[in-house]
Amino acid sequence: MGLDILDAYPTFGSSRMLKILVVDDEPDICSLISDALVDEGHEVTCAADGSLALTLACASTFDVVVADMRLPGLDGLALFRRLREESPTTDMILITGNAAVSDAVAVLKEGAFDYLTKPIRLDELVIQLNRIASFRALRRDVVEARAELKRAPVLEQLIGHSPEMLAVVKRIETVAHCDAAVLILGESGTGKELVAHALHEGSERRGKPFVAVNCAAFPDTLIEAELFGHERGAFTGATHRREGRFKAAHGGTLFLDEVAELSTAAQAKLLRVLQEGTVEPLGSNVSIQVDVRIISATHQSLKARVATGQFREDLYYRINTIDLSIPPLRSRSGDLAVLARLFIKRFSAGRPSAPEMSWQAWNALSAYSFPGNVRELMHAMEHAVLLSRGGTIDLEHLPISVRGGRAPQIEIQGTQMAPLGVALKEFERDYLVRAVSHFSGKRIQMAESLGISRKNLWEKLRTHGIDQTDEPTGLTAA
């Protein structure tokens, strides 16, 4: 690097401890940077060239590598590309001369965290490291939030208070205890597998295996082997014997997601298994007794596929003893605010408080139709929490697709408009839903802000069927 890269040695603000590898071919420069970063509370290792740095990074994972672009042997660019393969969780800051800025920018496009130009200031380097520490902490919080969500009881993961979802929950509780085959219908992202889990956990088979298979994920040539198993040598590539998903689910529940994608041959064999209660692995003449409850799901119309001959009618009735439809998010009145608030809290785990959402962001959120349903909303809230970095979630923090949503408009058919009373009622309900989100359900603050009494507010919320609890409880697909 050269001694000229170091400017005055100021006192910096502290940051979270990082494990840092500094790479430079001049020992004095490494020592000066190392001393400064150790004073900040970081753990620092130095390397004199790229090859040694790569060896150290492969032997022990570093949070950050700070390296000069010009190094003997393996230069900074080559080191970055190797580290991206060998240690993908390591962030990298490159130091470059003004003449090589274009190279550093190119590396940024490949995934480097940032670059600094010579002569650099150590306080600028520390600021960048503080940013990295914050981003890494956010990523850890998101991972922990996801793990917490997976650990939560299944029914507690079904969040919502809309009449549509309460009807779904009631139906789950009604049919879960029986052993009848259930067909779950709903768009992608509505939570069909979560509902299947809830049915399993509410049945006498809880504690036994719950095995899920996505029928659309396997080609026609492999789906039968996946479901029913195969013997060694049964087909090209079958180098060993394998038990199928039916055998793995014995005593429990087998969830067939996207069941409409099954080939005609697989449909015929599945029907036989359901009729006889036995499976016959490919390449074998021996039948194996299995005891499983079948829960299927699809986002397509099986009735339409039956009508066109794409799905067997007899199999349709076998898997559809009871049907269960999950409404899309856009038709679940009032649930958007509850779910958005829940996901913001989930992805803000570890922070003193969850961030608020600006009116501009909420307007865009409520105007968007969410074709990906609850799954898309969850990802949008994760995106927003990460970019807001604990501050107020604003319009710019939402995904581009959500920001582009258009505000809802009252439909006009021909020259006919909705009666004024209907339009006013729709506006009032939308306004109250936004207020519930803005004030996190706190009725006293809501009433004072809206200029009405608590009793009047309570009556309006009840009239519009809007959740009145201060915390999101209840059940809905997440």
Image (cartoon, rainbow, N blue to C red):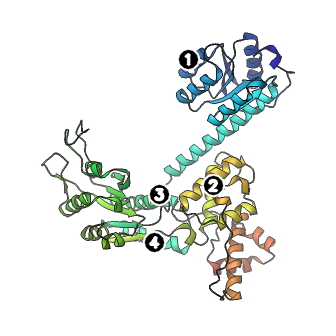
* Mark 1 or 4: the one toward you: 1
Mark 1, other Cα within 10 Å: few <14 / some 14–19 / many ≥20: few
Mark 2 or 1: in front is 1
Q: Which residue is mark 4?
A: 170
Residues 270 and 310: in front is 310
Residue 306 in sight in this render: yes
- The quarter of the rendered structure image containing the N terminus is top right
Marks 4/3: CA–CA distance? 15 Å
Picture quadrant where residue 45 is located: top right
| Between marks 2 and 3 in the image, the one whose residue lies nearer the viewer | 2
Task: Specify which label sits upstream in the sequence, 4 or 2.
Answer: 4
**Residue at horizontal 72%, vertical 54%?**
396
Q: Which residue is mark 1?
A: 55
Q: Position of residue 272 (x, y in %)?
A: 19, 61
Identify the amino acid type marked 4: Lys
Disc 1, SS: helix
Say left or right for 362 vs 321.
right
Residue 255: x %, y % from top left: 35, 57
Question: Which residue of the protein is positioned furthest toward the top in this rendering?
Answer: 27
Q: How far across and how far down the image is residue 192, in percent?
A: 44, 61
For marks 4 and 3, the one nearer the N-term is: 3
